[in-house]
Amino acid sequence: MIPEVETMKKHPILTVIGILFLVVLVSNIFNSGGSLSETAKQNPAAATQKQKTGSVTAAQVADMVDGVFKNNFPYSYETRLDEESGVFNIDIWSDDITSQSIAETRESGKLSVWNNMVSNLASTTSTIQNAFNENGHDEIVAVMSLCDPVDHSTTFLTIANGVAGYDAVNEIDLLNK
């Protein structure tokens, strides 16, 4: 196995991000004062009404997601909410995932670690999307990008709505087929 893939296994930051984020986000959504109350949980009609009234803003959902990342991965992410364009961007990176490791992983054909990470990140992105949707902000699309650790404008993976629209290892580019 190539060293970079082995390193990805030893540093599971991106593999466990989905699990940690899911647990913390779900806990925050249902236990924070800014989201569904116990009364709303018992009365779905009240929950729907609360969502329609917009009592939890898109910015508050974005802040909550940012807070989860800040607590768990303080130096390896950046979030941006653009309500005008309806996009919540989450850029993540790891020192172990570089252009060189991406090329070597693609050339080796040993994609199981990469594909597991993609699956976990797709799940995490779906969880973030659900946080917006459940709080009445389905006009916002959560987009997660895995970036180069030095040059964050270089993207290796982009996921939205549970789909990897760009995947440098698997050579997927849905926008530029």
Image: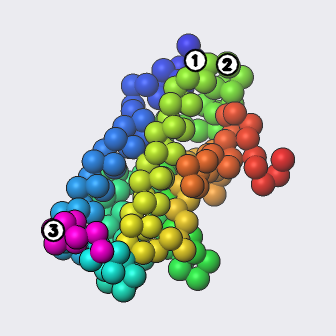
Q: Position of residue 166 (x, y in %)?
A: 68, 47
Using the image, determine if residue 40 lies above or below residue 118.
Answer: below
Q: Position of residue 150 (x, y in %)?
A: 55, 50
> What residue is shown at x 39% (from left), y 43% (from top)?
18
- How many labels, in total? 3
The residue at 50%/71% (across/down) is 138
Place of residue 61 in the rendered image (x, y in percent of width and height, measured from the top left): 37, 71
> Which amino acid, by three-letter code, is at mark 1?
Ile
Kind of residue indicated by mark 2: Ser
The residue wearing badge 3 is 38
Which stretch appears magenta? 38-45
Distance in Å between CA atoms under marks 1 and 3: 50 Å
Cβ atoms at labels 1 and 2 below 8 Å apart? yes
- Give amino acid for label 3: Glu
Displayed quadrant of residue 1: top right
Q: Which mark is residue 2?
A: 1
Q: Position of residue 96 (x, y in %)?
A: 49, 35
| Residue 35 appears in the picture as rendered | no
Q: Name the residue at the right extreme.
A: 177
Q: Nearer the viewer, mark 1 or mark 3?
A: 3
Q: Viewer-proximal residue, 77 or 132?
A: 132
Which residue is under mark 2?
108
